Amino acid sequence: MPPPSGGYKNLAKMDISQQLRQARQARGVSIRQLAAAAGVSKTTVTNIEQGHKSATVSLVQRMLAVLGYELTVTKKE
């Protein structure tokens, strides 16, 4: 899959709410579609994307999987 607009380098500089929004928009997925596929309300997705609510790692993984991404963690050196 191609990287989101701006590439991965710019994506890494954003907080998770911005990353989720950009990934969702890049894939052409509506908030309603993402919410339904991830098993949460539209309001929850909106609040996470706007930075008003935190998401669990599990929820972030589900949302990213819906969008065709995988959450990875690397050790900082």
Image: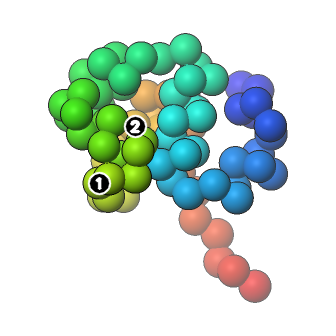
Q: Tell me if residue 42 comes above or below residue 60 in the rendering.
A: above
Left or right: residue 7 versus residue 69 is right
Residue beneath the point at 37% across and 23% down: 31
Disc 2 packing (10 Å; few <14; some 14–19; many ≥20): many
Q: Quadrant of the C terminus?
A: bottom right
| Visible residue check, residue 43 | yes
Expressed as whole percent of the image width and height from the top left, the position of residue 41 reads 19, 31
Q: Residue at x 30, y 18 (%)?
A: 32
The residue beneath circle 2 is 63
Image spot of residue 37 (x, y percent):
30, 23
Total label count?
A: 2
Indicate the quadrant where residue 46 lies: top left
**Height in image: 46 above or below 54?**
above
Could you give the CA–CA distance between mark 1 and mark 2, rounded to whole angstroms? 15 Å
Q: N-terminal of the two: label 1 or label 2?
A: 1
Measured from the top left, where is residue 12 in percent x and y?
69, 56
Instruction: Give whichever of 51, 3 is nearer the camera.
Output: 51
Residue type at the position of mark 2: Met
What kind of element bears circle 2?
helix
Quarter of the image for residue 25 reads top right
The residue indicated by pointer 1 is 53
Colouring scheme applied when the structure was drawn: rainbow
Q: Say which residue appears at 30% left-offset and 43% top-offset.
A: 47
Q: What residue occupies the far bottom of the structure in this picture?
A: 77
User: Decide: marks 1, 2 in contact (CB < 8 A)?
Assistant: no
What element does badge 1 sit on? loop
- Image point 56% across, 57% down: which residue? 15
Pointer 1: residues within 10 angstroms few (<14), some, or many (20+)? few
> Is residue 70 among what the camera can see?
no
